[in-house]
Amino acid sequence: MNKYNLKIKTVFAKFSKSRVLIILLLILLAFAILTKGKTVHLSNIMNILVQATVTGLMTIGMALVIIDRGIDLSVGGVAALSSAIGAICMVELKLPWIICVLIMLLIGILIGFVNGITIAKLSVPPFVCTLAVLKTTQGVALFILGGRTISGFPEVHAFFGQSSILKIPVSVWILLIFTLLGWLILRSSRFGKELYAMGGNPKAAWIAGINVTRNRVLVYVISGFLSAVAALIITSRIMCAQSTIGEGMELDAIAGAVIGGVSLAGGEGGVLGAVVGSLIIVMINNGLNLMAVSPFIQTGVKGLVIFTAVTFDALQRQRENRLLSR
Amino acid sequence: MESEIKTIVSLEGISKKFGGIYALNGVDFDLRNEVHSIVGHNGAGKSTLVQILMGGLKPDAGMIYLNGKQVTFSSPREALNQGIAMVWQELDNFQNLSITENIMMRRFVHRKNGTIDWGKNHELCRKYLERIKVDVDPRTLMGRLPLSQQQLVEFAKALSYNPAVLILDEPTSALSFTEEEVLYETVRTIRGQGVAVVYISHRLEEIMTLSDRITVLRDGHKVFTKQMADLDKDSIVDAIIGSSKQTQSHQTDKADSTRAKRKDFTSSPVVVDVKNLSKGRYLQNISFSLRQGEFIGITGVFGSGITELGKLLFGILQDYEGTILLDGKPINYASPNKAVKAGIGYVPKNRKDEGIIPNMSVGDNIILSSLDKICKLGFIDFKKKNEIINSIIDTIGLRPRKPEMPIVALSGGNQQKVVIARWMSNKSQILIFDEPTRGVDVGAIEKIYDLIRLLTENGVCVIVLSSEIEEIHAEVDRLIVLNKGKIVGEIDTSVDPWKVAFALAIN
């Protein structure tokens, strides 16, 4: 193994880390031009950030799960169920608000736990398990809501989605805090290191003595919890619970993570990249809206972006493998 | 009965290099309608020779003649089409498919309308299985069958091609006594029908009963090809071992130094006590004990059960009969995690699949099993981490001294050092090594044993499981020999030469 190959690998690593930021800035530039500057208005930037908080939170959880070679399709359903139950508690049962918030978070943790146990102990493939959980939670949410929209949330609930602290929206603060936490955990904690090992070589990680079961359950609990936090923000913004909450968010979260450099093969990627990736997704939505592009085309464009990101990731992996297997 | 002797395959002047080292150097090999055994040490070139024969490898030099005509095989499929079939030592089949699908893959019998006629296919496979007295429903999934039956199915599959040449690589390593007998009978029958059988095995007894001729390989050269009737066990063993000056002097030097160092462990406390350990057909009635600070070797050929023993001790395999006591307490770990917590470390056989984390750096690979030692409240103390990693890198002699280097940038030998080093920061009480020098170049082997010995200096117990009998004999004080899951002997390495161990292992 010579120095040449080593250098190439390090160069690639550096490139992929800043790649996301480069793409973000390029897209920002593109839309700034296409919308004749509307994109870069301060109010629009704020708009983007606020929208990004919900996707961003789910993307952080998704990034952790994908690093472990898993996937969590249930995030949207968790948000829906958490919102629905939160609404029942706050509006119909009129329980103390703090209790309701805690219940909403608990829903996320519980469903994450169900996912984790099923995947870690019963060896059900993550795709299958979380898909089933997605449909189940959506179903229960629909049932609870009975097709109606529950509004009349207590005013204090507006805190998450509509208040600001030091001129920065609370939801953005929440995203920042969890991004920081996620970054710290992946970079500097035992759990983070073990997660990367589990994703990089599950068998070797197990043989090295890592408690794979416990970590895997934890990672799905985190994802569920973050989806519930997202539900807090969503319900806080619209001050009601609807059956459409969370729909399609799993794909946005996955797309954000992959664009952000989290490899679907596992063991690679980070929270910062993932959050920037989700920003890109939201920015694309935002830009296309400003350009009054038909929502049908918007879906197509998003799909194309995801396809490009995944393909690029795969090609880079191939290139790296070819270099290193000489 | 084919009484006419004819040469079916002839390999002339075959050479094959792997990365500068000759696996085979100018080897001639001819095959008649006979049972022809190929024997030799690990690394002698048996697999390479046979892989060239069946089209899996291309020789760097030399020629292959099939029925007098020169041929080149560009793939095993080509060789198969020309009538050369092989049954591998390590099974590589479709676990999730049925026996029939495995046997008939790519040559299913179809109906006139193009769909697969499953009835006919199953019937055919039933007949193939009957031929070798295997009574299993061909619709059974391969993965559900015990290893021995899977091996037999592979055998039936090879036979179903009606090959002119059949290569069998350690075919009885997983079989029971009765199954072995059936296999021998089948081999004799097809030999009688004119098929040429190449038989690779470490088991001297079976080779001597079965073969017409035997070829001994050593270090890439052919020692001889002789009629079995002209040979006895000792001459075969001598030929396999050889009397190369290098080997002998290395062995004597090591034996001398070991004798000088030989400590008396009878006063040390017993750390591991294994009594009547049995596991299925892998291990039978194994008993031994390990004292504090001892460095023992457990050796045997492929299929002797040494790997399974290591896995049982570490919690990779569970459920056994008998007792395993650690410091007097019975153990049966549900996972390696529990074993590590109890102070056991394990270096797996297959570092690529089971050892290294390829996307991580050298430093991260080293510290992986000891994260709890450098963490406060779950977060890593980077200063402590770097201190420990750097000191370990110095100890194992890794150059350049760059812990951030990706582990995949290291050579095989250095990667192995890293996996071993994983346990240096863990203060393990017991270390188990499974084939620690496998795939490691000669220069690094010595360093690896130095590393292992370094670990024993702090009262750590070390078990090395290795099929490299000569190598391990030179390093340990005590060598336990396994043969087909049973302990067949315990060697005091300062007294008995490794030839004794080797004879026990291959008997």
Image: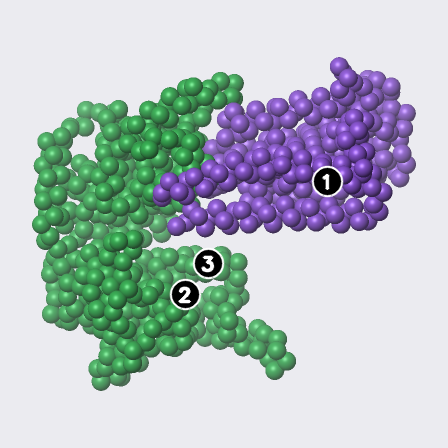
Chain colours: A purple, B green
> Looking at this rendering, what residue extends furthest in the top direction?
A166
* Chain identity of mark 3: B
Crowding at dot 1, Cα within 10 Å, few <14 / some 14-19 / many 20+, comes out as some
Circles 1, 2 touching at the beta carbon (< 8 Å): no
- Same subunit, tags 1 and 2: no
The label on residue B145 is 3
Q: Which residue is identified by label 1?
A: A30
Mark 1 vs mark 3: give the one in front.
1
Measured as percent of width and height from the top left, residue A108 is found at 70, 30
Rendering coords of residue A215 (x, y %) = 55, 32
Q: Which mark is residue B154?
A: 2
Q: Position of residue B428 (x, y in %)?
A: 34, 27
Instruction: Tell me what residue is drawn at x 37 percent, y 40 percent.
Output: A3
* Amino acid type, residue under disc 2 in the picture: Glu
Mark 1 and mark 2: Cα distance apart in space? 61 Å
Q: Which of the marked residues, 2 or 3, is nearer the chain's N terminus?
A: 3
Residue at 14%, 31% (x, y): give it. B262
Task: Measure the C-alpha gap from mark 2 to mark 3.
Answer: 12 Å
